[in-house]
Amino acid sequence: MALSETLEESEISDDLEQTSLSDQLTFEKIGLSKLETRSLRAWYGKNEAIKRINLQVPEKQITAVIGPSGCGKSTFLRCLNRMHEITPGARTEGEVILDGSNIYEPTVDPVTIRRRVGMVFQKPNPFPTMSVYDNVVAGLKLNGVRDKDRLNQALEKSLKLSFLWDEVKDRLKESGAGLSGGQQQRLCIARALAVEPEVILMDEPCSALDPTATAKIEQMMVELKKGYTIVIVTHNMQQAARVSDNTAFLYLGELIEFGLTEMIFENPKQELTERYITGKFG
Amino acid sequence: MARLMDMGLEKLTKTVLQMAELSEKSVATSIEGYSEGKNLSEQIYEWSEELRKLQEEVSDLAIELFARYQPVASDLRYIKACMEISYGFSRFGRYAYDIAEVLQMFGDLSECDHALVEKTAITTKEMIRKSIDAFSKRDVELAKSVRQMDDIVDNNYREHVSKMIREPKLDIKCVASTTLILRYLERIADHASYIGDSVIFIATRKHAGA
């Protein structure tokens, strides 16, 4: 679907100045989209947390989602791999198109989607009783992979991609819980990578980390985008500005503005975005 | 509630306005010196140096604001514009000194016709005043009007040069000194226009002419 067509369907509130998405992003700049939401809505019980969001996530780029606490960033992210529906009372409406197919079609297995669209959470959550090795290959084993060579190859590849191999290659049998916070988070990223996803969703992946560990993850993300599409939710605007190619600003469940990161942070079109990123909010 | 960065931005604005006042005084004094045949280059040099130091202060403050607060959007544009505007004001000071130096270099110019320089200086000083007012009031229309006046100064300079070429027998001392001063005024007018452009950028998020 053409970008302009998606725009016509956009239902950003009337009181906001309508901005043509095609003004902000061009095909030349963003390339093809990997993931797309069409009129996506999400609820917790009666509370509508996401309100008809239309967004195209470009392939092999980093897209950041920013906004104040409670604006629906994490909910939006969890809709992209059908994790939202796990929460009791939660439901979604609309479409999430992954490579041309709606992941919410009744025939689609959510487990398959969660393998294709991996997730990294705010707090590093390695399996505490497992070794570094077992943590990384857990997903593969769960999918029935038993071949030792294949597991070893996946282990080394994932740990290298997550910039962790050199630090743990001699400690593979030690507990994953014994690693530092930053290492644990990179272990979780390695675990997500081992099952060879196409998209990686990151929900505040550095909020519990110090600046050095954060810098490593950010460098790793920029390397990872060569092969993966990444969506990151962050409340750290400087982080969004540093790592992402495109930025979406959400407020009260609505997509207020989406554009190239440099444009959002230098010259946003919407007054609301301007006020939020300059800290003049509230 | 005021943001921490606001204190720094306020200081930035104050310093730029301090530069505005001093640079305007420098240009006015240099023209006065030319008209009245007074050598004021020492005084104007001091002001020009002060302006240079104030411009460094603006740059240092801008860098501190970048380092401390990572400004974005309107804050980022404002700081960028202040750096450009302060450069403009420091150039006013330098050209004012160059004008004062003309008298020092050529000596007595009382026999020369001052009319064209004085006429051009009136327009240039008005452009400076308008650019300062546009900055302090963030007045886009006023800022636009600065650039509209630039042609008057440009034409005066060009016409003088054409006349000089057409009439080679004119007094070389008068012709050369007038040419130099008109050229400095023309450069000041350009910088006043750039300041107007920066004000437009701050207020509208758009570069002039975009």
Image (cartoon, rainbow, N blue to C red):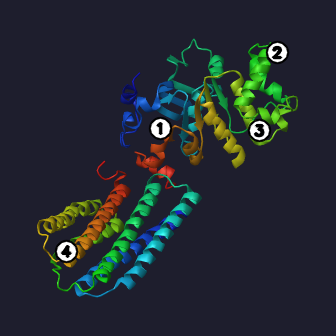
- Residue count near mark 2 (Cα–Cα under 10 Å), binned few <14, some 14–19, many ≥20: few
Circle nearer the viewer, 2 or 4: 4
Residue depth check, mark 3 versus mark 4: number of the one nearer the observer:
4
The residue that disc 2 covers is: A148
* Residue B175's disc number: 4
Q: Is residue B4 left or right of residue A205?
A: left
Residue A111 position within the rendered picture, expressed as x and y whole percent measured from the top left: 66, 18
Q: Give the CA distance from mark 1 to mark 4.
A: 68 Å
Task: Please name the residue shown 45% across and 77% down the image.
Answer: B50
- Which residue is depicted at the point 57% across and 44% down? A242
The residue lying furthest to the front in this view is B169
- Residues at discs 1 and 4 both on one chain: no
Residue A8, located in which quarter of the rendered image?
Answer: top left
For disc 3, the marked residue is A183
Do dots 3 and 4 share one subunit?
no
Tag 3, which secondary structure? helix
Circle 1 residue: A254
Q: Residues within 10 Å of mark 3 (few under 14, many from 20)?
A: many
A40 vs B113, left or right, is: right
**Image coordinates for residue A67, horizontal then vertical, percent:** 54, 44
Q: In this orientation, does residue A180 appear?
A: yes
Mark seen at residue A169: none
State which chain disc 2 sits on. A
The quarter of the picture where the N terminus of chain A appears is top left
Q: Secondary structure at mark 2?
A: helix
Quick check: do tags 2 and 3 share a chain?
Answer: yes
Instruction: Estimate how packed mark 4 is, as few (under 14), some (14 to 19) or many (20 or more) residues with alpha carbons within 10 Å.
Output: some
Disc 2 + disc 3, Cβ < 8 Å: no
